């Protein structure tokens, strides 16, 4: 028998001192922009933004390497493992505007594999920080390499940057692609196989 849920309570936990300090700063920012911080629509905005920023940067409180190491398994599998189309949401450290897209990650095991959910988790752990896409790509690669010591790691990220679309050059359809490879993926044949797998839909 399915029990009907009458209500849903969302529980979020934030550091009260940090929330208060950030909210005070955002009140000043909003006021300096020429808005009336006391009007109805903005009255609670500083606190909302303070909490939002803590969520958007919660990766600082996560240890990606420990996340990887929490689900390692011995397995004699030496073929490419690919996790593609991982959603990426991050914050450009230059203008504090979002960039978002997809990450494609692969590795070739060398006696150890990792639980599949851990790869999207470390992508998120690194992405939820002040970032540049180039560093994010390398951090994901380096974390997998250190945790698993595989025969090779490949990471490709495709992202759109709001700092290019909303301001500055204002190019709405531009996509930035970054890549980083180690080991076997530095060989042309293996790298091409990876690119083919992430580019095509498998039937």
Image (cartoon, rainbow, N blue to C red):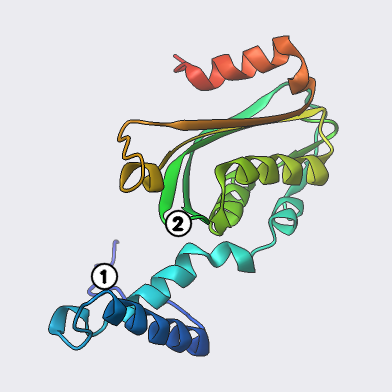
- Residue at image mark 2: 95
Q: Nearer the viewer, residue 34 or 125?
A: 34
Q: Residue at x 19, y 83 (%)?
A: 36
Visible in this render: residue 45? no
Q: Residue at x 32, y 31 (%)?
A: 173
Report helix, strand or loop for mark 1.
Answer: loop
Looking at the image, residue 70 sits to the left or right of residue 197; the answer is right
- Against 130, residue 80 (above or below) is above
- Against 179, residue 125 (above or below) is below
Looking at the image, residue 170 sits to the left or right of residue 43; the answer is right
Residue 44 point in image, percent of width and height:
26, 83
Looking at the image, residue 98 sits to the left or right of residue 104; the answer is left
Q: Nearer the viewer, mark 2 or mark 1?
A: 2
Quarter that holds the N terminus: bottom left
Quarter that holds the C terminus: top left
Residue 90 point in image, percent of width and height:
48, 52
Q: Nearer the viewer, residue 111 or 123?
A: 123
Looking at the image, residue 87 sits to the left or right of residue 185; the answer is left
Residue 77 point in image, percent of width and height:
78, 26
- Against 175, residue 60 (above or below) is below
The 10 Å Cα crowd at callout 2, few under 14, some 14 to 19, many 20 or more, is few
Total numbered badges shown on the rendered structure: 2
Task: Report which quarter residue 116 is drawn in.
Answer: top right
The 10 Å Cα crowd at callout 1, few under 14, some 14 to 19, many 20 or more, is few
Report helix, strand or loop for mark 2.
Answer: loop
Residue 25's disc number:
none
Residue 5's disc number:
1
Cα–Cα span, label 2 and label 1: 42 Å
């Amino acid at each position: 028998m399915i029990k009907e849920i009458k209500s849903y309570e969302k529980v979020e936990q934030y550091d009260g001192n940090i929330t208060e300090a950030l909210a005070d700063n955002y009140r000043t920012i909003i006021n300096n922009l020429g808005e009336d911080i006391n009007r109805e629509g903005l009255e609670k905005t500083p606190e909302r933004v303070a909490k939002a920023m803590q969520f958007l940067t919660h990766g600082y409180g996560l240890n990606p390497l420990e996340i990887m190491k929490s689900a390692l398994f011995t397995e004699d599998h030496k073929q490419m493992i690919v996790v593609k189309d991982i959603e990426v949401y991050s914050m450009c450290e230059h203008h504090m505007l979002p960039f978002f897209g997809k990450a494609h990650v692969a590795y070739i095991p060398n006696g150890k594999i990792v639980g599949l959910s851990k790869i999207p988790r470390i992508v998120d752990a690194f992405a939820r920080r002040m970032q540049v896409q180039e560093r994010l790509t390398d951090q994901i690669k380096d974390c997998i390499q250190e945790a698993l010591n595989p025969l090779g790691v490949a990471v490709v990220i495709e992202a759109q940057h709001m700092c290019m679309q909303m301001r500055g050059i204002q190019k709405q359809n531009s996509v930035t692609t970054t890549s980083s490879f180690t080991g076997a993926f530095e060989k042309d044949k293996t790298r091409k196989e990876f690119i083919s797998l992430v580019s095509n839909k498998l039937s």
